[in-house]
Amino acid sequence: MKQVTNGYIGDRVLKLNVGFLLAAGPGHSHETEFDVPRMRISDDVDLAFLRGPLRLSRTKEGILVQGDLQLGIEDECYRCLKPIERELEVSIEELYAYPDPNDSEFSIDEDAMLDLAPLIRAEAIIADARGALCQPDCKGLCPQCGRNWNDGPCDCGADIDSRFAKLKELLDKN
Ligand SMILES: [Zn+2]
Ligand SMILES: [Zn+2]
């Protein structure tokens, strides 16, 4: 195990020095393989893991990043809020522009660093927006007493209708 702060490694592993590839010129490529444990990629996204191959290809406009990555997303069930880990397969194909940063949403800075974190973060957030359940028939929390109905019914008198009213309220808030 790596020694890490707060159980997470930083996102430095996602900053790739591509100076050699920029210098090599169009037509050259480089392959790398990620197998990274718990990682904080931004203030709002933590990954449980990141795995998979990545190919960097030098083009005239910059570097094309292609890969089939597996992301472990730390999430919570949207009904009962139980922490869950989701595994997502994401195919990425994105141009990191160089030297003209206007050629793409992503670009390589003057130190020849290609930062994958914003791209991975965007993929994670898109996936997260779909919401996840701890189990397909998660019963959620009692809106009155907060009991997790997966553990059995409560005796506070709340019924299914108030549960849906509460869910709607939560959805409206979001
Ligand atoms: Zn749940
Ligand atoms: Zn209750």
Image: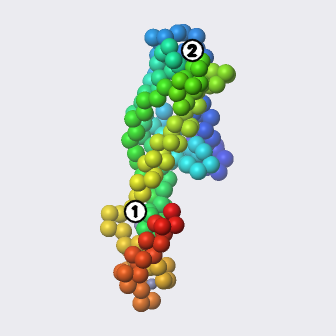
Q: Position of residue 83 (x, y in %)?
A: 48, 61
On screen, 142 above or below 137?
below
Q: Amino acid at mark 2?
A: Leu
On screen, 50 above or below 26?
below
Q: Position of residue 122 (x, y in %)?
A: 50, 42
Way the structure is coloured: rainbow
Total number of numbered discs in the rendering? 2
Instruction: Write the residue at 60% across / 45% down.
Output: 42
What SS does tag 2 mark?
helix
What SS does tag 1 mark?
loop
Q: CA distance from mark 2 to mark 1?
A: 45 Å
Which quadrant of the figure shows ligand 2?
Answer: bottom left
Q: Is residue 32 visible?
A: no
Q: Amino acid at mark 1?
A: Cys
Q: Position of residue 73 (x, y in %)?
A: 47, 49
Instruction: Write the residue at 46% across / 29% down.
Output: 94
Instruction: Write the residue at 63% across / 21% down.
Output: 112
Per the image, the residue denoted by label 2 is: 22
- Farthest residue, direction front: 102
* Quadrant the N terminus occupies: top right
Label 1 residue near ligand 1, CB within 8 Å: yes
| Disc with the residue nearer the chain's start (2 vs 1) | 2
Per the image, the residue denoted by label 1 is: 134
Q: Which mark is residue 113?
A: none
Q: Is residue 66 visible?
A: yes
Q: Position of residue 76 (x, y in %)?
A: 48, 60
On screen, 107 above or below 51?
above
Q: Nearer the viewer, mark 2 or mark 1?
A: 2
Few, some or many residues within 10 Å of mark 1 (<14, 14–19, 20+): many
Instruction: Write the residue at 45% across / 11% down.
Output: 27
